[in-house]
Amino acid sequence: MNSPLIGIDDLSIYIPKLYLPLAELAVQRDIEYGKLNKGLGLTHMAIPDCNEDAASMAANAVLDLVKKNDLKPEDLGRIYLGTESALDGAKPTATYILDMIQAYYEPTYGPNSLEHCDVLDMTFACIGAIDAMLTTVDWVKANPKRIGIVVSSDVAKYDLKSTGEYTQGAGSIAMLIKASPRLLSISDEVGVSTGPAHDFFKPKRTVKKQTFANLYSDSLGICKEKIIELLNTLEPDDSNLTLHKDTPVFDGPFSNDCYKSRVESALNQFNKLSKTDSNNRKSDKWERYIYHLPYAFHAKRISTDIAKAYFQAKGEWDQILNELGIKETEEGFTKAFAKSTQYRAFVQEKIEKSQRISGLIGNMYSCSIFLALISTLHFDCKENADLNGKTIGFLAYGSGAKSKVFEGTVQAEWSKIMEQLNLEQLIESRVAVSYEEYETIHKGECTVPLSNSGGFILDSVNDEPGNQYGARTYKLM
């Protein structure tokens, strides 16, 4: 007997109800809007309200998946979360998701209905949810009766006025992983490329109390000893003051280089594992390319070498070179190729649909590659494209740095799944906020929610000293 196909049976997406028009941010930052819109493909930035976080967004995506598929507690063997927006350094954010879904189940199934459901956070910058999905696919392969949920959830937050600010976004995507999937089966071959790098990271930041006192004693008009005494009330047993920031340390150009080199290396390994040669590569048969998109137009900006290999395998490269009239070794060749009719056609066929929704939401970190998948299939569905049985390639990346490349085969019920997603309604029902409101949320000064989000929301965070300090509670609206 042949083993059953394993993959994504269904999916759900949660998008925050608030957004900031990028035209508004452009005015505030004195940036030409065309550079954001025409240059990067950005129009809107999704913003989580002050009563939303990675856990509440994930729980809402999972809840929608549970309802659509009438899943019972005993159906769920695991809920694995990919995120880089974890709420704690030890307690998995997935435990909060479990708690919320269990509360939903309680009136019908009683308390602790999910106590035998495995939960886990997986973190590797923007590729963590891919790791969670591939791990869960293997878990189902070991026993095709198993059903798991993989959920990605993130808040992409950068410092105000930083070069990453206009790429911000947020949201969550949940996927049902099982045998004989209705949407997409996942390949056995996975190309991997890892090369440790500091292109984007969120370090534990500390400052010596004495250094802080030396720096600010005069401006505060307080003696150094008094400052240190005050700081000792926060960190009584440490000479350092520990600081946490959700915003990253990053080097954009370096990260682009890391992304490009890792993805190309992983793609080469995928083709080798697939037992193909340079003239008969498995990836050349992909109908669509699904990239992690830190901003909407990123994939088309870094795909020139991948497209070159594609045209070489098809025997068309020499003709392209002849038409360009410029040698590969000459300065400006890559730019000339990117403007060529052939490259534009490559992007239009393989990549363009994946960009469209990204520009309306922004970077979703671990969700972004799945948002690209949703965007692609959504517009292919609207255009009645014949994707049944076609393969699409996934080119995933996470800073730090790692890429995984694999393929999925579109299944017969894919269009039905996409129609049930109601993507356009979710996007159109959002509410625009002013720049002032955006800044208030960004700074953590917003205390009254600006939207009636419904679903699960953050109810409280315990700020009382003691063994429950920092504990979070949620409720279903």
Image (spheres, rainbow, N blue to C red):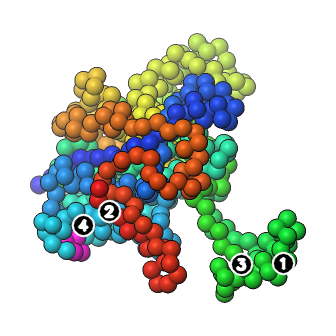
Amino acid type of the residue tagged 1 in the rendering: Lys
Quickly name the residue at label 1.
Answer: 224
Query: Distance between the Cα atoms at labels 4 and 2?
Result: 9 Å
Q: Magenta span covers which residues?
A: 112-116
Q: Residue 103 has which mark?
A: 4
Q: Nearer the viewer, residue 81 or 436?
A: 436
Amino acid type of the residue tagged 3 in the rendering: Leu
Q: Earlier in the sequence, mark 1 or mark 4?
A: 4
> Residue 282's spot in the image, x, y percent?
37, 38
Quickly name the residue at label 2.
Answer: 475
Name the residue: 26% across, 55% down.
63
Main SS category, magenta section:
loop
The N terminus sits in image quarter: bottom left
Name the residue: 19% across, 71% down.
113
Q: Earlier in the sequence, mark 4 or mark 2?
A: 4
Query: Distance between the Cα atoms at labels 4 and 3?
Result: 40 Å
